[in-house]
Image (cartoon, rainbow, N blue to C red):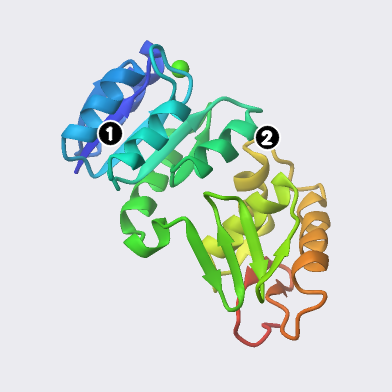
Amino acid sequence: MRLLLVEDEEGIGKFICQGLREAGHTVDWVQDGEKGLDHAANLDYDIVVLDLMLPKMDGLQLLPRLRDYGVKTPILVLTARDAVEDRVRGLNAGADDYLVKPFDFSELLARIHALLRRPPLQTTNLLKVGDLEMDTLRHVVRRDGRVLDLSQREFMLLEYLMRNAGHVLTRTQIGERVWGFDFYNESNVVDVYIGYLRRKIDKHAPQPLIQTVRGIGYRLSTDEELD
Ligand code: CA
């Protein structure tokens, strides 16, 4: 597998390169956004790992340009702690996944492998589960054609549920993905936000899509409710 790493920080770059090479992958490492765009647009990679804060051109400028060129390579964004807004913008700008710094290498590798396994359809900006539709690029959610007004966090939560539709997600998985690595599993924030989402998505619909899986977590599905 051939990967492109766009990361200006020497220490992190070396750490990622070494780990990926040890895992048997080929890695090209560039340290600014212009080189990143040039490499990603002109060479054939299986995946691009992209830091957001970069010299010459930052990741959020690079992403839409790359997608404008028609490059469909999966992109995993690396972002600083607490930059939730950047994460959302990154995903809207064409990234497929993100990882918050600092991270364990095993987590990075798992995310990369998950992206590579993901069928191309799911990297689209348009997600659909039953009559629930999300356009991640335009940041629009519709249920049965009716536009729903979601907060940024509700949107992130719903996108995660929709990208994993049919699968049970634990509160920890949801918390870590939507709230970041410093998420505390003891808090009930996931349940609270699931409640917000339910009110907006399921309240007026004949079929509820957000299902509680007792003792485990939640799943979004058009199938009959689990118990
Ligand atoms: Ca950086």
Q: From what the image shows, is residue 62 above or below residue 136?
A: above
Q: CA distance from mark 2 to mark 1?
A: 25 Å
- Image quadrant of ligand 1 equals top left
Q: Give left or right: position of 24 versus 139.
A: left
- Please give the name of the residue rendered at 25% of the width and 33% of the height, measured from the top-left corner: 40
- Please give the name of the residue rendered at 58% of the width and 56% of the height, measured from the top-left corner: 160
Q: From what the image shows, is residue 119 above or below residue 31?
A: below
Q: Give left or right: position of 65 versus 77.
A: left
Q: Residues within 10 Å of mark 2 (few under 14, many from 20)?
A: few
Q: Are marks 2 and 1 in contact (CB under 8 Å)?
A: no
Q: Amino acid at mark 2?
A: Asp
Q: Which residue is mark 2?
A: 182
Q: Which residue is mark 1?
A: 20
Q: Quadrant of residue 47?
A: top left
Q: Is mark 1 within 8 Å of ligand 1?
A: no
- Please give the name of the residue rendered at 43% of the width and 47% of the height, measured from the top-left corner: 96
